[in-house]
């Protein structure tokens, strides 16, 4: 079994069932299967063969899903790029993965054609392809379980995005576990909140396709519109919801999620990507009594490797919800600073080994052995884990993984910036990215730096505030003293 076969299998079993819906249309499994085959032929005609990369730079849509399926049927590798990212970042990713083709729409194609750089051919897709009567490719190309399925680009500490390579085996180990854990059936209706370049979307799409269920795409314009999200949850009769906690908090606080009638069909609520503050979680848990709450954990490099089902005792404790025990066939443990496996009550770095561990970073060779997450955890008496923090400068901003070094490298490219350091103030929905810069000449303004970053970074990585200083404080080994900055600036009356 591989990801390419899930839709075609469901099309054979129940082709008339709804497969995927967006704000503008929908497709049954039979229609999605046919569209994927037609697009596979078009991609093949443009030279796409097994293991080659195809960048998909589209808004979230039925057409984008069909394009992803088409790539898989050629035993090629799709690289999803969120429709909201700037042109320069899309170009960096396309060049970085040596893409053979970029699938995009007319508007973005016009931007790409005006680019100065050497980019691959384009396949312009403004909707599902019209059936031209020609035969599609006769059959899907054989796929080995260890062949790459997709590459997800995440924020990189070196100043450039890095591509996490995921094989069919990696993805299916998680998908199979998740389908069993939520007891998914063809009657389920999954909401898809996360962008396709965010690993949360893997559950929404492929657990649905594995079981013949439907997946309902939330457009990016609605992603942080709390009342619209609440209405979507009700109107689409969603049975399985999966998002970052920040979105659910917005829906509680500003969308009336815990007011009036309960969502009529919801049976499982899943969250991941950041801690869920227990005060908000307790309100939602009590309101949605009888709905299963699952806290899923795992970096992009492992997808979900631990999980915990929230209980009444968790909510009553007032403590952060555990990230739980190993899942998806993985082995998970904590390693202490002196090299031991941590026991109950001890802290250490979380380490993951097993089928979901990535194939590697694109351009850096195959990954071998366990993956060291950089997350510090405490081992519970029951063998599960509690999240405690990070070893490095990677942070989460509204569920998105952000390497502060990538923002700093972007800021440093501005001609008016001599040095730059980035801090995060607050947490959850209140988190703000603050750039602290030493100017090179006249101090740059916030709007100028925002425009500069917006040309190179996704929206969630653009600084919310800029503070100008004459020099950055240093530690004894010459590194920027972030704690001194935080104390001196972020807690001052002017911050």
Image (spheres, grey):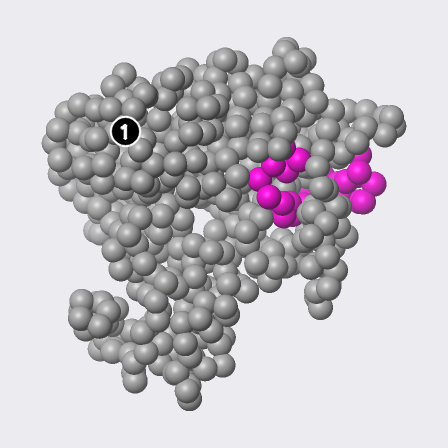
Q: Quadrant of the N terminus?
A: top right
How many marks the image carries: the answer is 1
Is-magenta flag for residue 50? yes
Classed neighbour count for the residue bearing mark 1: other residues with Cα under 10 Å, few (<14), some (14–19), many (≥20): some
Residue drawn where x is 42% and y is 29% of the image: 231
Q: Nearer the viewer, residue 377 or 295?
A: 295
Residue at mark 1: 258
Q: Quadrant of residue 126?
A: top right
Instruction: Say which quarter of the image contains residue 488.
Output: bottom left
Residue at 28%, 52% in the rendered image: 430
Q: Residue at x 18, y 37 (%)?
A: 279
| Residue lying furthest front | 260
Q: Residue furthest bottom?
A: 441
- Toward the viewer: 490 or 301? 490
Asked if 8 appears above or below 306 in the picture, the reply is above
**Residue 277 located left or right of residue 201:** left
- Looking at the rendering, the stretch of residues picked out in magenta corresponds to 41-64
Using the image as rendered, state which of residue 254 and residue 481 is in the foreground. 254
| Image vertical order of residue 233 relative to residue 490, above or below | above
Residue 67 coordinates in the image, percent (x, y): 67, 37
Is residue 438 depicted above or below 67 in this figure? below
Q: Position of residue 335 (x, y in %)?
A: 26, 44
Residue 171 seen from this side: no
Secondary structure under the numbered disc 1 in the rendered image: loop
From the top left corner, tell me how far across and down residue 183 is, in percent.
41, 15
Closer to the camera, 203 or 377? Answer: 203
Can you give x and y, in whole percent of width and height, for residue 259 in the image?
Answer: 28, 28
Figure quadrant of residue 258: top left
Please indicate whether residue 481 sits to the left or right of residue 60 in the image: left
Q: Is residue 279 left or right of residue 265?
A: left
């Amino acid at each position: 079994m591989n990801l390419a076969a899930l839709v075609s299998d469901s099309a054979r079993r129940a082709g008339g069932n709804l497969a995927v819906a967006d704000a503008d249309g929908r497709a049954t499994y039979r229609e999605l299967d046919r569209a994927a085959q037609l697009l596979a032929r078009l991609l093949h005609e443009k030279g796409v063969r097994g293991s080659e990369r195809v960048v998909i730079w589209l808004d979230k849509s039925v057409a984008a899903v069909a394009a992803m399926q088409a790539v898989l049927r050629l035993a090629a590798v799709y690289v999803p790029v969120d429709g909201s990212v700037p042109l320069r970042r899309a170009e960096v990713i396309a060049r970085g993965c040596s893409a053979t083709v970029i699938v995009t729409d007319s508007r973005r194609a016009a931007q790409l054609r005006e680019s100065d750089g050497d980019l691959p051919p384009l396949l312009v897709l403004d909707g599902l392809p019209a059936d031209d009567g020609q035969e599609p490719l006769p059959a899907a190309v054989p796929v080995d379980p260890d062949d790459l399925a997709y590459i997800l680009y995440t924020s990189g500490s070196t100043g450039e995005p890095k591509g996490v390579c995921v094989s069919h085996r990696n993805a299916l180990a998680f998908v199979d576990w998740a389908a069993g854990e939520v007891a998914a059936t063809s009657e389920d209706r999954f909401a898809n909140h996360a962008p396709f370049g965010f690993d949360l979307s893997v559950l929404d799409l492929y657990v649905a396709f594995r079981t013949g269920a439907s997946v309902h795409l939330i457009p990016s314009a609605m992603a942080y519109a709390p009342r619209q999200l609440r209405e979507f949850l009700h109107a689409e009769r969603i049975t399985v919801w999966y998002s970052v906690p920040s979105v659910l908090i917005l829906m509680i606080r500003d969308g009336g999620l815990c007011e009036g009638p309960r969502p009529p069909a919801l049976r499982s609520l899943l969250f991941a990507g950041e801690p869920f503050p227990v005060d908000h979680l307790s309100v939602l848990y009590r309101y949605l009594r009888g709905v299963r709450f699952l806290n899923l954990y795992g970096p992009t490099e492992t997808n979900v490797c631990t999980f915990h089902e929230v209980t009444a005792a968790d909510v009553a404790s007032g403590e952060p919800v555990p990230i739980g025990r190993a899942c998806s066939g993985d082995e998970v443990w904590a390693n202490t600073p002196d090299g031991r496996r941590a026991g109950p009550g001890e802290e250490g770095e979380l380490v993951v080994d097993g089928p979901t561990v990535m194939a590697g970073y694109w351009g850096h060779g195959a990954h071998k052995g366990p993956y060291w997450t950089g997350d510090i955890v405490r081992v519970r008496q029951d063998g599960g884990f509690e999240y405690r923090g990070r070893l490095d400068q990677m942070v989460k901003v509204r569920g998105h993984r952000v390497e502060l070094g990538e923002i700093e490298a972007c800021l440093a490219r501005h001609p008016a910036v001599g040095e730059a350091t980035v801090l995060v103030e607050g947490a959850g929905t209140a988190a703000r990215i603050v750039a602290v810069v030493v100017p090179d000449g006249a101090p740059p303004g916030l709007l100028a730096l925002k425009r500069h970053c917006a040309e190179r970074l996704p929206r969630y990585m653009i600084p919310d505030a800029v503070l100008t200083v004459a020099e950055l404080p240093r530690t004894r080994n010459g590194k920027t003293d972030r704690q001194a900055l935080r104390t001196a600036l972020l807690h001052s009356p002017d911050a």
